[in-house]
Amino acid sequence: MKFKPDTLANVHEQMAVIKAQSTGSFFTNYFREEMVGPQILSAATDRSVLLANAEHNFFRLYFFTTDLADLQQILRDVDLPGNVVAGYLTKATDKAVDENVAAAFQKSGFDHIATYRRMISYQLPPQRPNPALEYAIAADVDELYEGLFQTFNKYTEHLPTKNRLHGYVENRWVIVNRQASRILGAVCFQLQGQRVYYNYLYNLSRNALDFLRLQNNFYGVTHERGVRAGFLWINETNPPRCAA
């Protein structure tokens, strides 16, 4: 079985048909999130759909299935288009199901890379920005992009495209630590109503005070904008880094 070029609209239709024909539950890691790259590939059976999106220099894999045994079989049979990475959102209440999904991938030759845990706060610290507060500008996008890829794992941490990063900058969602015309650290976040999504924090200066200034300004800016709740994902395999 081979992946074929496809469109998101067609993939959505295939998923809807499979769901309609099933009398049971379904399993998926696809929630119609924005695709990073324009190339869409798909492969399908009567009970499962695989969606691959070209992201940077690898493919991110999404699945929709009503039969985990069928998912395991299609993962074994399909010719992968290159390096492929798949993630799956787990719930403490569905431990048995989560283990079965993980087993389907592992028995198909996939290796476990990392486990992330979501952290939520409903009482962000009421800080005030310090004089070091500086927002990124459009001319910083290339340097920010390089800093993110230097710091984070591109396979697991859903790094933004330059276009998406430019949108963060336009919304004043990127705070930087600039020294001698170089960006040595940044906080990237997204405001979603009265919540903030804490995407990335990196500090290339290795100076703890620089880290604290970035952190303080993040809390100060969110407090000024009336935001009191926020969440982030922690890489439990490599705890010091925070990412979306």
Image: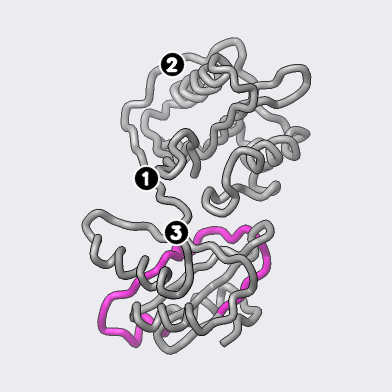
Residue appearing at x 72%, y 38% in the figure: 141
Which amino acid lies under the numbered mark 1 shown in the image of this protein? Arg
The residue identified by callout 3 is 112
Is residue 161 on the magenta stretch? Answer: no
Q: Which circle, 1 or 2, is nearer the viewer?
A: 1
Residue 33 seen by the camera: yes
For the residue marked with disc 3, what is the amino acid?
A: His
Place residue 214 in its image quadrant. top right
Classed neighbour count for the residue bearing mark 3: other residues with Cα under 10 Å, few (<14), some (14–19), many (≥20) = few
Q: Nearer the viewer, mark 3 or mark 2?
A: 3
Magenta span: predominant SS is loop
Q: Quadrant of residue 127?
A: top left
In the depicted structure, whether residue 184 falls above or below residue 127: below
Whether residue 14 sits left or right of residue 101 in the image: it is: right
Residue furthest to the top: 131
Residue 236 sits above or below residue 205 on the image = below
Taking the magenta stretch, the answer to whether it contains residue 32 is: yes
Instruction: Identify which residue, 127 or 105, lies in the foreground.
Output: 105
Boundaries of the magenta span: 17-42
Q: Quadrant of residue 188?
A: top right
Looking at the picture, tell me which residue is in the foreground, 20 or 85.
85
Query: Mark on residue 127?
Result: 2
Cα separation between marks 3 and 2: 39 Å
**Element type where label 1 sits in the image:** strand
Residue position for label 1:
117
State how many labels appear. 3
What x and y, as percent, mark residue 62?
A: 49, 68
Q: Residue at x 64, y 22 (%)?
A: 205
- In which quadrant will I find the N terminus? bottom right
